[in-house]
Structures are given as structure tokens and as C-alpha cells.
Amino acid sequence: MHWIAHALLSARYRWLAATLLVLLAQPLWAATPIPSAPSIAAKAYILQDYDSGRVIAESSADERVEPASLTKMMTAYVVSNELRNSHLKLTDMVRISEKAWRAEGSRMFVEVNTSVSVEDLLRGVIIQSGNDACIALAEHIAGSEEAFAEMMNAQARRLGMSHTHFVNSTGLPDPEHYTTARDLATLSIALIRDFPDHYNWYSERDFTYNDITQHNRNTLLWWDKTVDGIKTGHTSSAGYCLAASALKEGMRLVSVVLGTDSEKARARESQSLLTYGFRFFETHRLYQAGQSLADHRLWMGAQDTLPVGLERDLFVTIPRGQYDSLQASLTIDNHVEAPVTRGTRYGTVNVSLNGQPVAEAPLVALADVEEGGIWRRFVDWVTLLFYRLWS
């Protein structure tokens, strides 16, 4: 009896849970040695891969700091979100208040009681770092800058920026206006991912409004053709800050450097981090979202197998030259019964490099499957009964 039950499972139904990707590992001596990250002259910094989320280098990344004008990344994020939700159009005209016109610090030079398009104001925020443009958009969208700051904080919570709090749209200093390098990296990635149609503005080198041309303060846009954003910031208390992103041969990195002592220093330190990341690491997409990684045995269903895979693409960032040492495996629930709802988790994909875990992702059902007919359910019930009795 034991043999019959086992055969029923192994001959047709039993899924062989084993390695998906096992490639011959190169000798350790063949791998490129990975030096320590460069020494960065900043209060805090982080270097992160855009696709995999792997942090390649960091220092004081969770320490509370002033964001200065890097705040404007969240201001732009909220505006872009309003545009996506059709609460706003780029062609909408915004009336400039006296408060916006009197804004201190960097300005777009809008004039009081004039009307300016949302698109011009948004480009003024991104390229010219205009405090007046920030306040004008905040008042237009939320009625006041204080109410707009609440919208900024709501988005920060949604994105998982757990150590961030905003009180204004500009980044002017306030004891209750703070963030961390890690949270700013999270925001940088979200900007690129969620609003790709607006991201090209972050690489524009200059913008002219009211016959005044101002240059983007991100000097890396001139130094390095792979850099395409994102935002600079500076106050006397925060120092010189830069959130940067670069794309090279399909690999995108995001760096955040906070509290350097000059414009050149923030660019130089950011360049050093990006160079390190591209030189010594590589990112690979191992599996696509929706790709069937296995047909798992399904009991009591209208079909006897269930395709399982990932809801999102799975990327890994690893030291260069070690791709052939990657190993991936699946763990799946032993007993899965219909009905099944698409997206329900039934296991995990685990990826390791030389025995060390580098990535993990939930394994989910890729299809809805209803219960089978009476005869199918009866046959499966008998099969399971024998298996449970004798295994």
C-alpha cells in the first residue's frame, strides 16, 4: 500500500522541489577582489541599486539630518501624483501669492498676482530649485503650505520613509523638518519608478523663465554622461547635499550624499560612490514577474497542477564576475488545495551566492483555480488518504 500511494504521488503529481538555477561555481581565485567602499567626506551617505534594492555602501544612513532642498523631491513627487490622479493638469494656471513671491533662498522669479502653468512651476522646482515655485504649487494643490506638508508626510509614510517628517515644501530649516540618507534613497527610487515621464526634467541642465536662465546645480550632469538626476540641496546648517542617479549598461545606481563642505565636494563624493558601484558590482534580473517557475501539484482542483512564480521581477546585485556562483531554489507548501486565488503566497524563492543569501521573494499562484468536480475531488481524497496512512 505504501508503494502504491508513493507511486501515485511521484509518477504524476509530486513536484520535484529542487534547485532552479545551479550553475558551476568559478574558483574563488577567479573572482574580482572587492575592495572596501571609498572614504566619503560627508555627514551621511548611501549607495543603492535601483532594481534590486541592495545597499552597496552606507555610513550613518539612518541618522537624522536636514534635507535642505532635497525636500523638493517630495514636493515634486506629490505634484506628479496629483497629475497622475487627474487632480491637476500640466496646463493648469497657478496664481502666484505674495507669500510665494516673497520666498527667500533660491527662486524661479515668479511675479506676484501673475499666473504660471503647473509645468513651468514643476520645472522651476526641479531644475532651478525655486522656493517660490514650491510654495505656489503647494498653495494651489492644498490651499496652504502647511496642508501640503501633510500630503508630503502621507506619501512619506506610504513609501516607508519611517524616519522623515516635513513641515514645508522648500527645505528651509526647521527643527521638525528632517529625514535620513536611507529615506531619501527610497524617495529617489520612487521618483524614477513611479513617474518616468517626468524624470527627464531632472537631467535638464538649464531652464529659462521670465527671461532669466538658471543652470541646474547638479554639476554631475556635466561631468558624467551616465548621470541623469536628481537633486541638490544646501543650507548653512545642512551643508551641501546631492541625491544622484546614473544608468550604465542597464544598471542604475542611486546615491545620496549629505553634509559635504562645498558644491565640488558633494559632486566629487557622489561620483566616487557611483564609480565604486559600477566598477565592482553588477545587477542581474533572474526571473520575470508572471513567469511560471514550477507547476505544483494541486489537490481537489479543476486542474491537477498550479503554476507558481513571482509578482515582481527578481533582481540581484552581486560582486562582478560571480554570476556563475549564484544558486536559486524554491520552497513550496507541501499541500495546496483548490480553490486558489491568483497572487496567494505558497512558498519562497531563495537566491544565494557562495552559500550566503542575497535575495528572497514570495512564490505566488499565477492563476485562479476553482474546485474540481465530485469525481476529481474523490480521487484526490483517496490518494491523499493512502499517502497520509503510509508515508
Image (cartoon, rainbow, N blue to C red):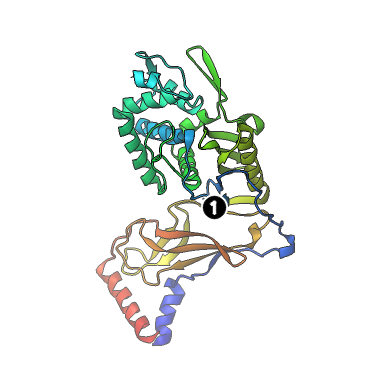
Q: Is residue 85 left or right of residue 215?
A: left
Tell me if residue 215 comes above or below residue 193 in the rendering. above
Quarter residue 344 falls in: bottom left
Which quadrant holds the C terminus? bottom left
Q: Which residue is mark 1?
A: 54
Of all residues, the one furthest to the right in this rendering is 29
Q: Secondary structure at mark 1?
A: loop
Res. 105 in view: yes
- Indicate the position of residue 111 as horizontal and vertical percent values: 40, 14
Q: Is residue 16 left or right of residue 356?
A: left
Tell me if residue 299 comes above or below residue 72 in the rendering. below
Of all residues, the one furthest to the top in this rendering is 211
Tell me if residue 49 comes above or below residue 349 in the rendering. above
- Indicate the position of residue 102 as horizontal and vertical percent values: 40, 19
In the image, 103 versus 215, the foreground residue is: 103
- Indicate the position of residue 129 as horizontal and vertical percent values: 49, 27
Which quadrant holds the N terminus? bottom left
